[in-house]
Image (cartoon, rainbow, N blue to C red):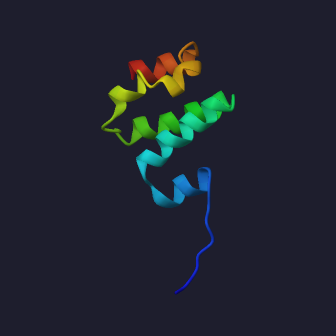
Amino acid sequence: MKRTRATSGPALAKASGDVVVHHAQATMFAATGERAKAIAQLKKLRVKNYREWHWIAVDPNLASLRELPSWKALQSS
């Protein structure tokens, strides 16, 4: 069996193209105080018309972002 090197963070999201990874990355960045990176991940979800966007608006893991103007702009787009 061939082994592959595991990737994480933005490289994983880019490689997979999976929107669920972007959501997970956004929550991780929000939890670690990297709010700009969290918003960047959410912007990727918005562009990809994430079907679970309604959950983003109430996700408790993203609460720290709700005061940001960039959050408000994402919600209104």
Q: Identify the residue at horizontal 58%, vertical 16% (top origin).
A: 68
Q: Can residue 40 be seen in this view?
A: no
Q: Where is residue 21 in the image (x, y as percent from the top left)?
A: 48, 48
Specify the farthest residue to the bottom.
1
Q: Position of residue 11 (x, y in %)?
A: 60, 56
Q: Identify the residue at horizontal 53%, vertical 16% (top origin).
A: 66
Q: Quadrant of residue 36?
A: top right
Q: Identify the residue at horizontal 30%, vertical 38% (top origin).
A: 51
Q: Where is residue 18 in the image (x, y as percent from the top left)?
A: 42, 52
| Residue 53 falls left or right of residue 68 | left
Q: Identify the residue at horizontal 47%, vertical 39% (top origin).
A: 23
The answer to which of 70 and 51 lies nearer the viewer is 51
Above or below — where is 21 with respect to 45? below
Q: In which quarter of the image is the C terminus?
A: top left
Q: Can residue 7 be seen in this view?
A: yes
Specify the farthest residue to the right.
33
How many numbered discs sit on the rendered protein? Answer: 0
Q: Position of residue 52 (x, y in %)?
A: 33, 35
| Residue 45 falls left or right of residue 7 | left
